[in-house]
Amino acid sequence: MASLGQQAARGGGITLLGQGVKLVLQIANLVVLSRILSPRDFGLVAMVTALIGVGDVIRDLGLSSAAMQARTLSRHQKSNLFWINLGLGAFLAVATFSVAQPISAFYGKPELVAITSWLALTFLLNGFQTQFQAELGRNLRFFSLAWTELLALVLGFAGAVSAALLGYGFWALVVQQLVQCFFMTLLRVASASWWPGLPRRHANMGGLLRYGGNLTGTQVLVYASSNIDSVIVGAAFGSTTLGLYNRAFQLLSAPLNQFFSPITHVALPVLSKLQDSASEFMAYVVRAQLVLGHSVAFIFAAVIVAAEPLIRIVLGDQWTASSPILQILAIGGAVQAVSYPAYWVFLARGLTGAHLRFSLISRPVVIAMIALGSIFGVEGVAAGYAAGMCITWPLSLWWLSRQGVSDVKLLLFTGLRVLAAGALAGSATGILVHLIHPSSSVAHIVLTAVFLFASYSILILVSRKLRSDLRAMVLVLMLLRGRKAIGQETQPPAGTMRGRGRSASMWRLASRSRRKANRE
């Protein structure tokens, strides 16, 4: 357990550092390209990616997660997974090329034929590199995953800026995706220290394919519910409005992706190794939820209060119409953050079939809310997306409880506490900033940060539960620094012990016993 904790610590630290650099690069990408290109340019590319992006989910077929989740994986199984992903990537590249004309006709934009045809190549490249990425993750080589992604991102960004400055318009965004996919593939193949053999018929693939197939069904539904908004906005309101919506969504998803994707890459293999210890498993999930939830809630509370000055500074005056969209989406993003650890539980416990059945119910609810909201314009679409997140979160926890997963109430109460803290601190900050009415965008953002930090500090001082949350988050930071292994609590988890009297004494005795066992 101590060794696993140290590996998780190193992996978490490297991943967070890499994602910090990636966030800076993504912000630079948003700032620079948004000031060179027009909303229409972004809208045209978003029209295509919203439709063909589901192919990337099918191309993976859930097999990268299946490879990382499997307790054992033979050489022949890994080779077969590679050939399956490559074959799917090639098939989807041809299929995407063939639907370029229908996509163009659907939106009534002739430029989409060429955009779709060139983006079809990304399926082939990503299909080739999928199992190399899984091999790096399975071996906990988080540094290799981080630097290959960052370098590919830098090269793609450089290609996009060069094309944009030369006046190629939306082609700059196409160049960016192609360059990034090409170098991601090249670098991860070179880093994996593994090469697939020929496919073998008799390798046991049934369990891997069932896991991946169930996960793919879920991911297709999730993708549809997460991108139907872009399809509706593009078809109903045009490429310029979609460009405004897309930029707001990108400002939202940039910080979210920095938390969701990397933490999942660290959490999934670690949780898979904790399946036999229910208490340690859920303790790890709750702590991850606290770090993820409080971090995102703080950021999004600031975004809601200072959306317009933030967009004016980051993107420019031509994008200020995106500010109300961003504020509404931020509410849904905060709920999504506290609900995301339930997804890890489904994957780590191998409950992909149950998750698929849950998604068959929950994702149509999200799609219906978005469609209903579209009646009220683009802001209604954003509100429908946020409402869908609010409805599906408690449903996911109830569904987990039906699968025999214990202590899911901890995830609910912890998430509600995180959201309540963010709402209270954000509301107080908004009132104070409104009363002062700062004269400049910079002053607005500075005051928002100061008041929000002060509001959170006051809440922590008056709330015992939030102080317990803070201690748990500090424990995670100590874990990331390698000072503690998973399961070495310094305080009883909130909601399990009161921390005084006989219970506290028993807790301290148990903690000393665990520390002694680890030293021995």
Image (cartoon, rainbow, N blue to C red):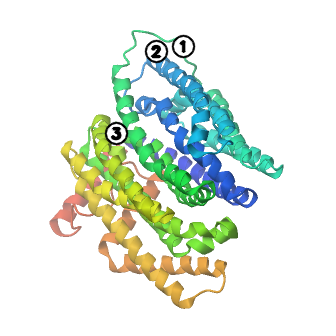
Q: Which residue is mark 2?
A: 76
In the image, what residue type sits under mark 2?
His
- Residue at 41% over, 40% down: 219
For the C terminus, give its image quadrant: top left
Residue that protrudes farthest toward the left in the picture = 502
Q: Which residue is mark 1?
A: 197
Q: Amino acid at mark 1?
A: Gly
Which image quadrant for residue 122? Answer: top right
Q: Are marks 3 and 1 in contact (CB under 8 Å)?
A: no
The residue lying toward the viewer, choosing from 360 and 269, is 360
Between residues 130 and 135, which one lies in front from this camera angle?
130
Find residue 29 and report its horizontal and vertical position in percent.
Answer: 68, 54
Residue lying furthest right: 166
The N terminus sits in image quarter: top left
Which badge, 1 or 2, is on the more N-terminal residue?
Answer: 2
Return the residue at label 3. 348
Q: Which secondary structure, mark 3? A: helix
**Is residue 513 in view from this perspective?**
no
Mark 1 surroundings: few (<14), some (14-19) or many (≥20) residues within 10 A: some
